[in-house]
Image: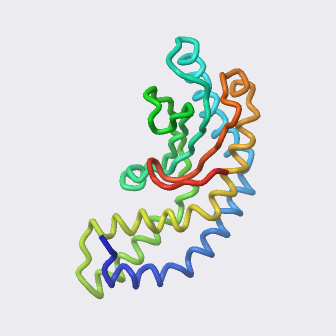
Amino acid sequence: MEASIPLTMAEDFLLDKLEENAKELIEYFAANKQQIIDSFTEKFIELCKLTRQQQENGLKAPIAFVHIASLRSSLLTETYEFRISMFDNRFWLDTVETAVYWKGDFFFRHVEPDIAEISKQLKAQASVPEYEIHEFRYRYALCYLLPPAQAIIEEIAAEALKAPAFAELMLDENIAVIFGGHMEGGGII
């Protein structure tokens, strides 16, 4: 479904905020870098342990993909989690779920205040259904999140991949680390 005219106006309005928010996100990461890397790595090691146990029990083939996904549901519930998953070479067809959830709420610090602001302005101009506001929240979060977040996630993931627990896994010879939405588009980082 295409966005209505009010949501198109909202997108235009928020473009200016994206640049400002992205700058603040990068500054926040710089100021809290080690703490963020440590919290991500802790969850990644937890995932490695789970994966290793599955491999030792003959349930999991060598890992070919590490997928870091933003979750639509976590935006709706405002929990702001990322799903970190490991897959064999069948990717989505891997039948053994191997995932942990990492709270990366700092990425989304501006989403709710910005959505509240634009929602107020939109509702003053037109009748906008709540489901359109939810859809807009998701699209806005991804637009806001993906460009600066990808560089941050690359740095965080690079550090996590150095964990000895990862090296202890059975790994495919060609590992890909992917960042994007869950079951949606993503890119190799």
- Residue 60's place in the image compared with 147, above or below, is above
Q: How is the image coloured?
A: rainbow
Seen at 53% across and 11% down, the residue is 57
| Left or right of 73 on screen, residue 156 | right
Q: Position of residue 125 (x, y in %)?
A: 29, 88
Seen at 37% across and 51% down, the residue is 77
Front-lying residue, 145 or 117: 145
Please identify the quarter of the rendering in which residue 6 is found: bottom left
| Left or right of 70 on screen, residue 6 | left
Q: Quadrant of the N terminus?
A: bottom left
Seen at 45% across and 26% down, the residue is 96
Q: Position of residue 31 (x, y in %)?
A: 74, 56
Please identify the quarter of the rendering in which residue 136 is found: bottom left
Please identify the quarter of the rendering in which residue 118 is found: bottom left
Q: Which residue, as the protein is rendered here, is positioned at the far top?
A: 57
Front-lying residue, 40 or 109: 40
Seen at 33% across and 69% down, the residue is 133
Q: Position of residue 12 (x, y in %)?
A: 47, 84
